[in-house]
Image (cartoon, helix red, strand yellow):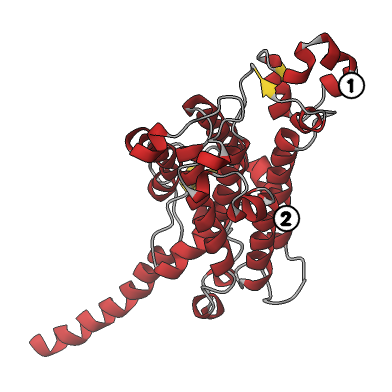
């Protein structure tokens, strides 16, 4: 009798193993109280680095003797260069001139390196515009639009300069009748750059920190694009949730464009291809954000720069998770 039971048990096991394997690889609807709009635990930790950095830099400026005692100009929101407590406290330091001032160029360059060198987006080292690459370019375009309207142009002055004027600021040159006569109405209402060209200075209003805005926007954009690839290469669990058209909240895995396209052997082999440059740009952005927090602007000006950047990140990377129609257009990194 025992001799007959052994084959029967083996036969039963052979029938259940494929079913268990199928269940393990099939994405299922997730029963979770977490909204798709909320960041994952790792994303929350990553985003928390930004306000933490601003807080750390501000505390440093209060506690470090040289930074605390160095003269500070409320007009220029910086230390005079001749008495600056650090090389990084000088506006003309090389990192500020050649990296921060043209920060969106470096952000764009790093993103394009990732987009065309990492195999998760399409054939490596080719200019083939796959659906993932097209949607990646669209997300870059949305972030670039946000950067442009706040720092470059918004039907005239950019929004940062408009905000300064709306809160009572003006060019110091036009406070006198003589200065006003030297500046036309158009230039008076134009930008901080026009004010400086006329020999004046911005004074009186709320000056959103453009440095904080740019550094957070650019580095967060790069992190959100490469994070799924980094997680996959490290073998970590994908925690992002999405809402389907029928209202169900499920793992983002159900929308992966073919499981073999995401987890193929080529991706595992070339998991770091194109990631190094974005990591380097994001890392240097963090360092310059810390220097900005320590030596430039008031706390509230830095906070508003952070807030404006976070609005863009939330719109492009979290909002589509809850709205299938929007998600079908802009996509999601790694999906």
**SS label for mark 1:** helix
- How far is mark 1 from mark 2, CA to CA? 35 Å
Q: For the C terminus, give its image quadrant.
A: bottom right
Left or right, 310 with respect to 231, comes to: right
**Quick one: which residue is furthest to the left in this view?**
2
Q: Is residue 83 above or below residue 255?
A: above
Which residue is at the front of the view, 104 or 271?
104
Location of the N terminus (image quadrant)? bottom left
Between residues 237 and 294, which one lies in front from this camera angle? Answer: 294
In the rendered image, the vertical position of residue 168 relative to residue 77, given as above or below? above
Residue 37 visible, this angle: no
The quadrant in which residue 266 appears is bottom right
Instruction: Report the side of 253 relative to 15 (left or right).
Output: right
Which residue is rendered at x = 57% and y = 30% of the image? 77
Q: Position of residue 85 (x, y in %)?
A: 45, 43
Instruction: Please provide percent x and percent y for residue 166.
Output: 70, 15
How many marks the image carries: the answer is 2
Q: Of callouts 1 and 2, which one flags the residue occurring earlier in the amino acid sequence?
A: 2
In terms of image quadrants, where is residue 68?
top left
Image quadrant where residue 122 sits: bottom right
Q: Are marks 1 and 2 in contact (CB under 8 Å)?
A: no
Foreground residue among 189 and 242: 189
The single residue placed furthest to the front in the displayed view is 82
Taking 5 as reference, is 238 above or below it? above
Look at mark 2 in the image and give the residue it sits on: 137
Q: Residue at x 66, y 55 (%)?
A: 98
- State whether residue 173 is above or below residue 317: above
Residue 186's tag is 1
In the rendered structure, find residue 52 and report the number of the disc placed on it.
none
Q: Position of residue 207 (x, y in %)?
A: 62, 26
* Residue ID at (73%, 65%): 130
């Amino acid at each position: 009798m025992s001799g007959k039971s052994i084959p029967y048990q083996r036969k039963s096991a052979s029938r259940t193993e494929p079913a268990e394997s199928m269940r393990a690889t099939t994405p299922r609807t997730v029963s979770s109280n977490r909204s798709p709009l909320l960041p994952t635990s790792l994303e929350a930790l990553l985003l928390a680095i930004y306000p933490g950095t601003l807080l750390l830099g501000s505390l440093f400026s209060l506690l470090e003797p040289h930074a605390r005692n160095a003269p500070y100009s409320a007009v220029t929101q910086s230390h005079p260069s001749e008495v600056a407590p650090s090389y990084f406290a000088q506006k003309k330091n090389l990192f500020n001139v050649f990296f921060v001032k043209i920060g969106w160029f470096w952000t764009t360059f790093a993103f394009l390196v990732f987009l065309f060198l990492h195999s998760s987006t399409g054939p490596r080292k080719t200019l083939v515009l796959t659906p993932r690459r097209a949607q990646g370019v669209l997300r870059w375009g949305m972030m670039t639009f946000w950067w442009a309207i706040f720092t470059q142009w918004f039907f005239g002055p950019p929004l940062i300069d408009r905000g300064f004027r709306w809160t009572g600021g003006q060019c110091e040159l036009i406070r006198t009748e003589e200065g006003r006569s030297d500046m036309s109405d158009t230039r008076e209402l134009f930008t901080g750059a026009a004010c400086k060209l006329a020999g004046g200075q911005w004074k009186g209003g709320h000056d959103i920190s453009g440095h904080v805005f740019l550094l957070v926007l650019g580095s967060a954009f790069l992190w959100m694009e490469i994070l799924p690839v980094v997680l996959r290469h490290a073998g970590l669990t994908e925690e992002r949730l999405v809402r389907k058209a029928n209202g169900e909240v499920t793992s983002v895995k159900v929308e992966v464009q073919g499981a073999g396209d995401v987890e193929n052997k080529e991706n595992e082999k070339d998991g770091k291809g194109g990631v190094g440059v974005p990591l380097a740009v994001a890392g240097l952005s963090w360092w310059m954000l810390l220097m900005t927090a320590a030596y430039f602007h008031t706390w509230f000006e830095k906070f508003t720069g952070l807030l404006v950047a976070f609005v863009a990140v939330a719109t492009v990377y979290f909002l589509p998770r809850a709205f299938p129609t929007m998600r079908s257009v802009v996509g999601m990194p790694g999906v």
